[in-house]
Amino acid sequence: MAGTYIITGANGSLAIPAIQHLLTKYPNSTLIATVRNANDTDLNTLSLRNTLNAFPQAKTSVRQLDLALLSSVHDFAKSIAAEISSGKLPPLSAIICNAYYWNLIKPIETTADGYEKSFQVSHLAHVALVLRLLGSFGPTGGRIVLFSSDAHKPGGANGLAKYPPSIPDDLEQLVKPATDVPVDNLGKGFLRYANSKLAITIWMYALNRALVKDPSLSKITAVAINPGNLSDSRALRINTPKTLFYLSKFVIGPLRPLLRFMDPIMRTSAEAGADVMDLATNEAFPGERGFFTMLKKDESSVESLDEGTQQKLWAKSAEWVGVGGADTKLETLEL
């Protein structure tokens, strides 16, 4: 499907092979690849540029976008919308909300906006991006790809989860959690990551309800994908304990073929990236909505299916990011 594709965290382990897949299989696409640091002194960004250079005829652009700063997200979305409106870019075909953040070795981190960093980067920044850009899709619609994880389900994180993910009654605890007592950087850090993935999954259902209600946007579909447990992901070696770093490098990677018998969703970033792009282009499951594990339609957690929780988180997410009715193409933000 020709059009503009935006992918966040474009220099990540999954994103780079996903981009290769897109530009190989769908060469007429226009790609906007966003990264926190667009300078080539960032080796991951340099790797992204080298990947793009292998497709000299492709229409690609690397843009700087700091998801930990909501003003950056709002400004970026306004700029993209203006470029599409002026004809500089074709209408959107997909927004691929790939970027996320976790920290399993330090106490709670807060962004300049005053929100817990994992929740803002993984969820809130993408809420702002998606809501502001809904009006930039073409008349044939398109797809929004959100990233969930098996961690969004209680007991679904292969031993890393010490505390089950859950949406608190007081939603403010998601963005301004209390200081960890006792200190448990690994356990509580992973809980914050898992809660962000649960929120993403919940918000996907609410977004789809809003899109279906709006005749002008009903051809846009949202999916949340658990891409699998990526044994070669760089994330296993960033902001993680040394034990996990060495486990990923010397055990998980080399023994992947055997470990797959124990974990059926373990796979490589390249395998996951291809599935993500096939969903993004509507090549896979055209016009469908909902939750996927890898490239199979699946059931998300019981909590994520609660419509009352979906409605509350939908409203609060828009409030947290400062998006009102005048900032989005949706006829109403009321579900």
Image: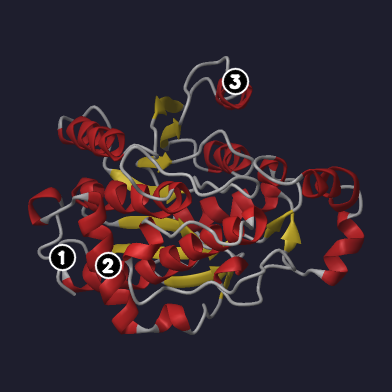
Along the horizontal axis of the image, is 291 left or right of 274? left
Which image quadrant for residue 219? bottom left
Q: Judging from the image, what secondary structure is the residue with disc 3 in?
A: helix
Up the image or down, 313 lies above or below 26; here it is: below
The reply to whether callout 1 and callout 2 are in contact (CB within 8 Å) is: yes
Estimate how packed mark 3 is, as few (under 14), some (14 to 19) or many (20 or more) residues with alpha carbons within 10 Å.
some
Q: Nearer the viewer, mark 1 or mark 3?
A: 1
Distance between mark 1 and mark 2 Cα atoms: 8 Å
Up the image or down, 115 lies above or below 171; here it is: above
Q: Which residue is mark 3?
A: 46
Q: Amino acid at mark 1?
A: Leu
Estimate how packed mark 1 is, as few (under 14), some (14 to 19) or many (20 or more) residues with alpha carbons within 10 Å.
some
N-terminal label among 1 and 3: 3
| Residue at 73% in and 68% down | 158
Q: Which residue is mark 1?
A: 333
Up the image or down, 82 lies above or below 96; here it is: above
Q: Which residue is mark 2?
A: 314
Q: Which mark is residue 264?
A: none
Distance between mark 2 and mark 3 Cα atoms: 37 Å
| Residue at 15% in and 65% down | 333
Estimate how packed mark 2 is, as few (under 14), some (14 to 19) or many (20 or more) residues with alpha carbons within 10 Å.
many
Nearest to the observer: residue 169 or residue 25: 169
